[in-house]
């Protein structure tokens, strides 16, 4: 006997993100526009710090893009061939994103160190400062657009923090531009390394999260020992085994288990009543979107060759 429980938490998150999807899209457009402007500005001025900040803008754009992708994929219907729809595609996109960001960060840091040791005296500080100030203003505008939604949606909150981080990167480039104008050309390389060091943790953390999901590890915030204790505390339940919890995509945890029930209850046909108690228990204590339980008598476990705790 199996039971399915669809919680409201992930739906609430999806709805919250959906309500602010337009805000995310506007900030994404602004970020991509400024990123292209910074690449052009870097080529014209010869500033590596501007190019590094464009890479930092890429981290913002990819983060916001993933938030929008998650909302769009979550809305796509499941099919008989893809029973969870396209939700896992977000994780694959995040993996590609993490690898690209890691490459950008390492390249910027290596080039920045080289530029610091052998500064380029031909950097045009005026263009460098002008483009960086435009980026700074764009970040401020992005923060104002996202501010109303950051308390309601985790995805919007994440995008807000990324834009805030890029604001610091733009400040670093402006400061470097001023230093270059004042006769300290090494500042361009130093700022490049600083921005690269801002990008690298984002890439590492994103890749760690992706690996966590792909290895189907227990979702963050879910304590299986506590889940088991709650389940075994339900009247009629005498044991729980083959307890698994994993994540389909961000915000969509899944749980399955074999639940051993007192034979007398099963003989009376009360297995469904136990199932209802389990669903009520888990929906009240744990933020798990989708639960599947197999209700069985205790003696069935001895026939399962793959059974584990």
Image (cartoon, grey):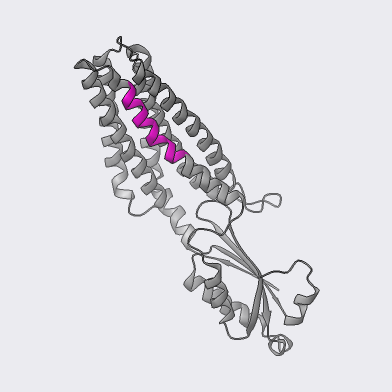
Q: Is residue 269 left or right of residue 198?
A: right
- Most common secondary structure along the magenta stretch: helix
Question: Which residue appears at 43% of the width and 36% of the height?
Answer: 200
Q: Position of residue 221 (x, y in %)?
A: 48, 62
Q: Dividing the picture into quarters, in which one does residue 90 lie?
A: top right
Residue 198 painted magenta: yes
Q: Position of residue 54 (x, y in %)?
A: 38, 26
User: Residue farthest to the left?
Assistant: 182
- Report if residue 157 is visible in the image: yes
Q: Nearer the viewer, residue 145 or 45?
A: 45
Residue stretch in magenta = 189-203
Answer with left or right where residue 243 lies relative to residue 38.
right
Residue at (50%, 46%) from the top-left corner?
A: 70
* Residue at 55% in and 46% down: 210
Residue 284 at x, y percent in the picture: 48, 73
Position above or below: 110 against 9: above
Quadrant in the rendering for residue 224: bottom right
Residue positioned 29% across, 30% down in the render: 170
274 or 262: nearer the viewer: 262
In this rendering, the answer to whether 186 lies above or below 248 is above
Residue 183 position (above or below residue 222): above
Image coordinates for residue 2, horizontal then vertical, percent:
68, 71
Count of numbered circles in the view: 0
* The C terminus: image quadrant: bottom right
Q: Specify whether residue 28 is in view.
A: no
| Residue 273 covered by magenta stretch | no
**Which residue extends farthest front?**
117
Dividing the picture into quadrants, the one containing residue 118 is top left
């Amino acid at each position: 006997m199996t039971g399915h429980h669809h919680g409201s938490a992930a739906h609430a998150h999806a709805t919250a993100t959906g309500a602010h999807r337009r805000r995310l899209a506007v900030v994404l457009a602004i970020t991509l526009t400024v990123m292209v402007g910074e690449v052009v500005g870097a080529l014209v001025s010869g500033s590596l710090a501007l190019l590094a900040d464009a890479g930092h803008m890429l981290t913002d754009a990819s983060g916001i893009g993933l938030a929008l992708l998650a909302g769009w994929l979550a809305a796509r219907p499941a099919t008989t061939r893809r029973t969870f729809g396209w939700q896992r595609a977000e994780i694959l996109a995040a993996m590609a994103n993490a690898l690209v960001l890691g490459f950008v960060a390492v390249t910027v840091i290596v080039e920045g160190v080289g530029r610091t040791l052998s500064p380029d005296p031909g950097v045009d500080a005026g263009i460098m400062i002008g483009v960086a100030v435009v980026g700074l203003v764009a970040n401020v505008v992005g923060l104002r657009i996202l501010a109303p939604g950051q308390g309601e949606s985790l995805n919007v909150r994440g995008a807000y923090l990324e834009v805030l981080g890029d604001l610091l990167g733009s400040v670093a480039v402006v400061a470097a531009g001023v230093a270059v104008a004042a006769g300290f050309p090494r500042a361009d390389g130093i700022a490049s390394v600083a921005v690269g060091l801002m990008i690298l943790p984002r890439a590492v953390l994103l890749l760690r999260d992706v690996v966590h999901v792909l290895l189907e590890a227990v979702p963050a915030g879910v304590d299986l020992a506590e889940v088991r204790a709650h389940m075994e505390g339900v009247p009629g339940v005498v044991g729980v085994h083959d307890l698994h919890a994993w994540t389909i995509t961000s915000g969509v945890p899944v749980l399955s288990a074999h639940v051993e029930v007192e034979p007398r209850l099963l003989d009376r046909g009360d297995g469904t009543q136990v199932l209802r108690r389990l669903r009520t228990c888990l929906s009240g204590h744990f933020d798990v979107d989708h639960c599947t339980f197999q209700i069985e008598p205790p003696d069935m476990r001895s026939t399962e060759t793959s059974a584990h705790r």
